[in-house]
């Protein structure tokens, strides 16, 4: 695909987090009951046409195949359920008729009530949801306490929809789902009362463009008082470089490798946390298994030492006062990110029992990689119009723009850094006009045709080329 491998790798990690879900937790301390789960929030950032969506689709293919198999199994179970339900209803009707006949003959007759066990409605295992309201997503979570994944191709559109007035409940629902360990109850007149999910565990994955994520982060940084940390929950925030080289690749996909990857997903999906992963059952104060609480694994001694060393340095950095509040909030959530990534690496490799040091090393390497991408994203969001003007002036000096009049589109279609859309380009041009480097051209004809004003055109001052 000639896309950055980052898009595939990060999506695979998020997909593994979905299939593991909330069935097992990881406790990063030796004795504490602090528990994190494998669900991840991912945002791949790249310009249009850099193959974000196709590469993510390839990485999600094993998960989609599991979903197809679960759907087929559910249809089979529903056929059996229909027959059992019909037979149950006939028995219930016959029993009721027998009681009515006895009471008709003798209103005071002693009748024996027959308790009939109604067959359970089969539930569909959901791995991925593409488009659902918060209310519908809650219903899905009720049926899938192990967790579900939400996939949105244009992620910022979803985030912006939750910024609108009246969407506070939806926003709160997603915020709750990031933790993976909290219940959620909705009481509505129209939908009834006590619609409760014992646990909401959401993985949120998608992609967006540099301009859109920069704008959203800029608003999050500026509105520090109102910022609730929604965007900061994207621990897998990926913004890779795009290679300037291209090679024509035309070969058959590696079917053996694709099958091996799918087998990892299938194994994780079918695993029993206690039997296959060696997880410990959570006991209540009476020493009995605590209902509704998933089992857990801890870190082995070497992994625990590595995590403690990393966290000591990390917490000191967070408290140094060097970071903006929004950026500090983002990196504070690595407390969940690192142990959950270690859990994913451990289980995907077939690990059992305590999380290994090897898995923790890889999780810590991921944290350093992700830190650099997060700093890039927040740094881009703090770019000023003057920074954009400097970039545009360099492009002028480098001869990247024509000497004849040109439109804004000529600039932002080039995809230059910091000049990726109409608004950013207009900001830069306004400053260069103010300082005499450019001018807006007044052309004799103001319209191409009746009712359609011509786009403004701009001319470089020849002095700026010297």
Image (spheres, grey):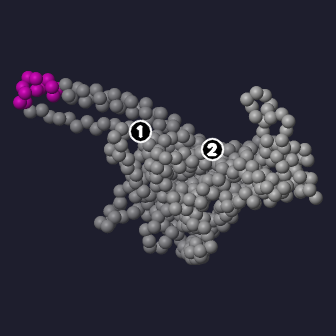
The residue where tag 1 is placed is: 122
Counting from the top left corner in percent of width and height, residue 270 is at: 51, 49
Query: In the shown orientation, is residue 450 left or right of residue 91?
Result: right
Earlier in the chain: of badge 2 and badge 1, it is: 1
Q: Residues within 10 Å of mark 2 (few under 14, many from 20)?
A: some
Say whether residue 413 is magenta. no
Q: Nearer the viewer, residue 232 or 34?
A: 232
Say whether residue 100 is magenta. yes
Segment tinted magenta in the rendering: 98-109
Q: Which of 74 and 409 is in front in this view?
A: 409
Identify the residue at image location x=85%, y=38%. 443
Counting from the top left corner in percent of width and height, residue 92 is at: 25, 30
Q: Secondary structure beneath disc 2?
A: strand
Query: In the shown orientation, is residue 5 left or right of residue 364?
Result: right
Q: Can residue 8 be seen in this view?
A: no
Identify the residue at image location x=41%, y=62%. 281
Vertical arrangement, residue 382 with respect to residue 211, above or below: below
Q: Residue 153 carries which label?
A: 2
Query: In the shown orientation, is residue 355 left or right of residue 439?
Result: left
């Amino acid at each position: 695909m000639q896309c950055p491998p980052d898009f595939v790798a990060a999506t695979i990690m998020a997909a593994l987090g979905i299939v593991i879900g909330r069935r097992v937790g990881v406790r990063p301390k030796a004795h504490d009951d602090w528990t994190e789960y494998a669900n991840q929030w991912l945002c791949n950032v790249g310009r249009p046409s850099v193959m974000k969506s196709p590469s993510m689709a390839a990485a999600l293919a094993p998960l989609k195949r599991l979903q197809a198999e679960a759907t087929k199994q559910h249809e089979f179970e529903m056929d059996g359920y229909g027959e059992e339900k019909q037979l149950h209803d006939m028995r219930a009707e016959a029993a009721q008729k027998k009681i009515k006949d006895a009471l008709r003959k003798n209103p005071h007759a002693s009748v024996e009530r027959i308790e009939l066990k109604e067959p359970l409605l089969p539930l569909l295992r959901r791995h991925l949801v593409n488009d659902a309201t918060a209310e519908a997503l809650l219903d899905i979570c009720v049926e899938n306490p192990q967790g579900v994944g939400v996939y949105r191709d244009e992620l910022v559109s979803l985030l912006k929809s939750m910024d609108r007035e009246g969407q506070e409940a939806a926003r709160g629902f997603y915020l709750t789902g990031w933790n993976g360990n909290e219940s959620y109850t909705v009481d509505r007149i129209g939908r009834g009362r006590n619609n409760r999910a014992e646990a909401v565990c959401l993985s949120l994955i998608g992609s967006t463009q540099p301009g859109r994520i920069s704008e959203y982060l800029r608003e999050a940084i500026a509105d520090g008082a109102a910022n609730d940390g929604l965007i900061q929950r994207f621990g897998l925030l990926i913004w890779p470089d795009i290679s300037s080289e291209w090679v024509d690749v035309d070969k058959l996909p590696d079917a053996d490798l694709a099958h091996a990857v799918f087998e990892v997903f299938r194994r994780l999906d079918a695993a029993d946390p206690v039997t296959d992963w060696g997880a410990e059952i959570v006991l209540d104060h009476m020493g009995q298994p605590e209902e509704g609480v998933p089992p857990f694994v801890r870190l082995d001694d070497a992994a625990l030492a590595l995590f403690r060393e990393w966290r000591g340095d990390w917490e000191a950095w967070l408290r140094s006062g060097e970071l903006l509040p929004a950026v500090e909030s983002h990196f504070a959530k690595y407390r969940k990110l690192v142990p959950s990534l270690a859990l994913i690496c451990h289980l995907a490799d077939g690990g059992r029992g305590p999380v290994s040091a090897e898995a923790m090393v890889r999780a810590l390497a991921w944290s350093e990689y992700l830190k650099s991408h997060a700093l890039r994203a927040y740094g881009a969001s703090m770019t000023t119009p003057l920074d954009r003007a400097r970039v545009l002036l360099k492009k002028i000096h480098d001869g990247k723009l024509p000497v004849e009049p040109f439109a804004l589109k000529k600039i932002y279609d080039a995809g230059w850094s910091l000049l990726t859309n109409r608004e950013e380009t207009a900001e830069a041009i306004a400053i260069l006009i103010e300082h005499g480097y450019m001018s807006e051209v007044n052309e004799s004809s103001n319209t191409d045709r009746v009712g359609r004003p011509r786009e403004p055109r701009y001319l470089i001052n020849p002095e700026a080329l010297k």
